[in-house]
């Protein structure tokens, strides 16, 4: 679960806010037990319901498909949170840090730029992408379970994998067309 920690460190999210995490579930009973790990984050849908319901256009979709939030426009109505079928948005409302109300110096630094009273979510580490780097979760994944790339480029690693292996999208029936794909077992 290094991706979860990498995201928290890279993006400086407050306690209880996880732009990226791994859910794990155990199935069966001893001795036939199976454990499944499912990384979850914003799915950067091609048809994002969160964008459609935002009354201020704070939630928007960039030309490259990444769904982003303009925190200056966000009024904290939480419509986007209700509309997201993946539960990938969080409301930043608690000023406390990990050690209580008094923020440590490092918390003061990493929380800078995070506005209270707004919705937050994974940005695919836009600041890193703009520097030609991978998102922190992808770079940190020691099992190389995460691959990031341009879905529009038929020669990209991610496009080739999607074409050649059995993959699935979560909640495909909702027709949001999420940009996150999972390899099918």
Image (cartoon, helix red, strand yellow):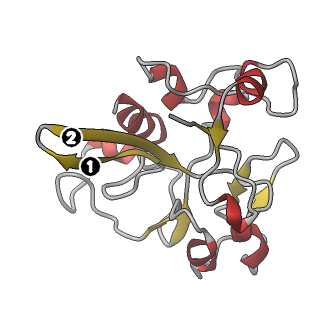
Depth order, front residue of 101/40: 40
Residue depicted at x 88% and y 46%: 63
Residue depicted at x 27% and y 39%: 34
Q: Position of residue 169 (x, y in %)?
A: 64, 48
Q: Quadrant of residue 80?
A: bottom right
Q: Badge 2: few (under 14), some or many (20 or more) residues near its Cα, within 10 Å? A: few
Q: Position of residue 24 (x, y in %)?
A: 31, 46
- Specify which label sits upstream in the sequence, 2 or 1: 1
* Residue 144 numbered tag: none
The relative height of residue 102 versus residue 124 in the rendered view (above or below) is: below
The relative height of residue 176 versus residue 99 in the rendered view (above or below) is: below
Q: Badge 1: few (under 14), some or many (20 or more) residues near its Cα, within 10 Å? A: few
Q: Quadrant of residue 55?
A: bottom right
Residue depicted at x 55% and y 67%: 119
Q: Is residue 181 visible?
A: no
Q: Is residue 173 found left or right of 30 in the rendered image?
A: right
Q: Are marks 2 and 1 in contact (CB under 8 Å)?
A: yes
Q: Is residue 184 found left or right of 150 in the rendered image?
A: left
Q: CA distance from mark 2 to mark 1?
A: 6 Å
Q: Is residue 53 visible?
A: yes
Check disc 1 and report its element: helix, strand or loop.
strand
Which residue in the structure is indicated by mark 2?
33
The extreme left residue here reads 30
The relative height of residue 164 versus residue 71 in the rendered view (above or below) is: above
Q: How many marks?
A: 2
Depth order, front residue of 50/28: 28
Q: Position of residue 69 (x, y in %)?
A: 68, 59
Q: Is residue 98 found left or right of 84 in the rendered image?
A: left
Considering the image in quadrants, where does the N terminus appear? top left
Q: Position of residue 89 (x, y in %)?
A: 53, 63
* Residue 27 numbered tag: 1
């Amino acid at each position: 679960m290094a991706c979860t920690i990498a995201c928290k460190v890279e993006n400086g999210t407050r306690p209880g806010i996880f732009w990226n995490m791994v859910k794990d579930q155990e199935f069966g009973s001893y001795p036939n037990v199976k454990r499944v790990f499912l990384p979850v984050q914003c799915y950067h849908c091609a048809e994002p319901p969160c964008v459609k319901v935002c009354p201020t256009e704070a939630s928007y979709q960039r030309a490259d498909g990444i769904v982003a939030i303009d925190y200056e426009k966000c009024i904290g109505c939480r419509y986007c949170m209700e509309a997201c079928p993946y539960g990938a948005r969080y409301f930043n409302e608690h000023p406390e840090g990990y050690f209580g109300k008094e923020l440590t110096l490092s918390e003061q630094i990493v929380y800078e730029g995070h506005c209270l009273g707004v919705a937050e979510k994974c940005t695919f580490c836009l600041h890193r992408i703009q520097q030609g780097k991978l998102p922190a979760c992808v770079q940190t994944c020691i099992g190389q379970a995460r691959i990031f790339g341009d879905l529009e480029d038929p020669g990209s690693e991610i496009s080739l994998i999607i074409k050649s292996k059995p993959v699935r999208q979560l909640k495909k029936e909702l027709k949001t067309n999420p940009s996150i794909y999972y390899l099918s077992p």
